[in-house]
Every structure is written in structure tokens, then in C-alpha cells.
Image: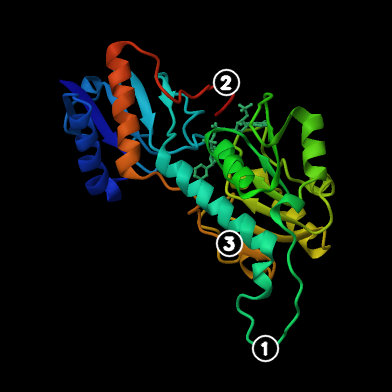
Amino acid sequence: MVVALYAGAVATADVWMPALARAFAEAGLAVDLVRPGDVPPEAVEYIVYAPSGPVTDFAPYTQAKAVLGLWAGVERVVGNPTLTQPLCRMVDEGLERGMVEWVAGQVLRAHLGLDRFIGRHTPHWEQVAPPLAPERSVVVLGLGALGAAAVWMLVTLGFRVTGWSRSPKAIEGATCLSGAEGLEAALARAEILVTILPNTPETTGLLNARTLALLPRGAVILNPGRGNLIDDEALLAALDAGQVAQATLDVFRTEPLPAEHPYWRHPRVTVSPHVAAETRPASAAKVIAENIRRGEAGEPFLNRVDRARGY
Ligand code: NDP
């Protein structure tokens, strides 16, 4: 019997523990799924982890073979000095679908100019048809599990899509750029810019006064990645100057976004409360089960985080 500790959010344990138990049974794994305090820490072999859960010190879990994250982003755990066990993050169908749907919806909203009509209750009949998707250039920063899925959907919808990542990539139907020069070229063509990058020291402040100035005037920014990517003061200045026409932000440096933050009141900012993509228990539990199976079979874990890279 393998001992796995549920160390996700206490408030959602009632949802997660049955989903995990079901996935373990379906995978034919004999797992004793315990909560903190049920067994001594040194009896735990796998830690099913979320930053919103109770575990902050991994040192007592001397026999743990892996920390299996329920979240895609790892910035709150990757630098934890007590973490010596392999760390895996969550990549699953639910997160991917959620991100694809959020990005498709927000890109189409910007592309079609839907904000001109939604909420209008004064007569104004102006027939200006939007361009078609092949006439619109959309840029996605970050071509990982979620960014690549978003690119695929945007290509399917017919947009002219450019993606950018750290290492060179190839995605059918899209232009892929990488590195510092690639970023400048990507930003210069971003009528709609989507940021799906992780929070690392290298990505912090990536969108700042200098890089925002590289965008075509009137660009739209969609950020479902992480709040650290944007220098908030620079974005507000770019919005006020008309350099950026609109920003829809799902993630922030401080969450929940404080009530006094200017984003809440800015007429051309939409605040979305970190709902772009959520880990869904039914699909994510299967990924956790597969990683426990791999750990027991001596196979490499899925979605292992590179601690030096930070993602
Ligand atoms: P991945 O780790 O699969 O992909 C990360 C991508 O970012 C890779 O393409 C990587 O490049 C690129 N990247 C990282 N650092 C740099 C850099 N310095 N310069 C250029 N490119 C860089 O992550 P996911 O796609 O699974 O998730 C991305 C992020 O989305 C998560 O880290 C999380 O912050 C956010 N997220 C937000 C959610 C929400 O609800 N708003 C939900 C889930 C995730 P390379 O391919 O070369 O390694």
C-alpha cells in the first residue's frame, strides 16, 4: 500500500479526496490517501500539493518520492529551501480546455470589437464590419502546455498567429519566434497580445514602458499568465496614452486585486478574477494517479519542474 498525503486546500478536500480515490482505483493502484496528522510525516511517499494547502515545510517528509502539484504555476513552491523531493506541476485536459476557451473568447471579443455594443443603451447605428480573422495578427507569449493549445485554437479560427517562447518551437500554421530579438519582432506585430508565461525572475516586468512602446498603437493585451509579467504603472500609462486600447487581466501581483487598485476603475481595463483556467478534479486526479504509477514503476515523472529554470 502506497501512502499519499492530501496537502491541497482544506476547504476543497471533500471534492479532491474522492476524485483522487476514484482515479487511484481506476488505475489499479493501492493507495492509502491520508490527511496531515493521520500518519507520521516519514510514512508519506507522495505529497499531493497545492500552495493553498497546509504544507510549507517539506523537510519532515523524508521518504516522500515526489511532490505532485495540483496547480500549473509553481512560483510559490519552486524556491522553497525545504523542498528536496522532485516537484511535478499540473498539466491536464481541464486546465488546457479552460485556457483555450478563455483565450478564444477574449480574442474574439477584442477582434470583433464587441465592447462597442455590450452595455450600449443609447441609439447609435454605425455599420463598421470588423476585419476577418486572417487579417488580424495575434501574438501569444509562452508556448508551453497552455500557450501551445491556445495557439492551436487561434490558428483553427483563422487568425495570423505568432508565438514566442524561450527555446525555438514549431507549431503548424503559426510563426514561432524565440529569444530577445524574437520578442521585439513579436511585439511589433501584436494587434492582440496574449501572455501565458510562468512567473519567474526572467519574466517579471516583461511588459514594461519600453516593450509596451513596441506594440502597434491601439493594441489589446490579454493576460491569463501571471501578474508579475506586467509593470502595472507602465500599462496604466500606456492605456492613458492610447498606446494600449484595452487590457483584460485575469492575474495580478496581489490577489484578490485590492479594492483601491486603479485597474478596478479604469474604463478600458477588464478585471477577471483568476478564473481563466482551473484545475478540474476529475481530469487532474488521473494525472496524479499516473505519476504515482510511474514513481512506483521507476519511470520518469510527468511534468517535472526544472527548479533552476523556475518552471
Ligand atoms: P509551461 O511550463 O508548459 O510553458 C511555459 C512557456 O513559457 C514555455 O513555452 C516557455 O518556453 C515559456 N517561457 C518561460 N520563461 C520564458 C522566458 N524567460 N522567455 C520566453 N519564454 C519563456 O506552462 P503552461 O503553459 O502549463 O502554463 C503557463 C502559465 O500559465 C503557468 O505558469 C501559470 O502561471 C499560468 N496559468 C494561469 C492560469 C489562470 O487561471 N490564469 C491557470 C493555469 C496556468 P520554453 O518552451 O522554451 O520552455
Element class at badge 2:
loop
The answer for how far apart the CA atoms under marks 2 and 1 are is 56 Å
Q: Which residue is mark 2?
A: 308
Q: Left or right? Give the position of 37 relative to 226.
A: left
Q: Is residue 202 left or right of residue 76?
A: right
Residues tagged 3 and 1 counted as in contact (Cβ below 8 A): no
Residue identified by numbered label 3: 271
Instruction: Give residue 232's position: percent from left, percent from top.
Output: 70, 53
Tell me which corner region of the image, top left, top right, bottom left or bottom right, holds residue 6: top left
Residue sitting at x 41%, y 39%: 93
- 2 or 1: tag closer to the N-terminus: 1
Q: Which residue sits at x=46%, y=23%?
A: 304
Residue mark closest to the camera, 3 vs 1 = 1
Counting other residues with Cα less than 10 Å from the Cα at mark 2, is it few (<14), some (14-19), or many (20 or more)?
A: few
Residue 208 horizontal/vertical position (percent)? 76, 46
Q: Which residue is mark 1?
A: 122
Badge 1 crowding class, 10 Å Cα cut-off, few under 14, some 14 to 19, many 20 or more, is few
Identify the amino acid type marked 3.
Val
Question: Which of the two residues, 271 or 129, is positioned nearer the viewer here?
Answer: 129
- Compare residues 9 and 153 and report the one nearer the observer: 153
Q: Earlier in the sequence, mark 3 or mark 1?
A: 1
**Whether residue 191 is situated above or below residue 85 in the rendered picture:** below
Q: Considering the numbered disc 3 on the image, is that residue within a helix, a strand or a loop?
A: strand
Q: Nearer the viewer, mark 3 or mark 2?
A: 3
What is the distance, in whole Å, between disc 3 and disc 2 at their CAs? Answer: 32 Å
Q: Earlier in the sequence, mark 3 or mark 2?
A: 3
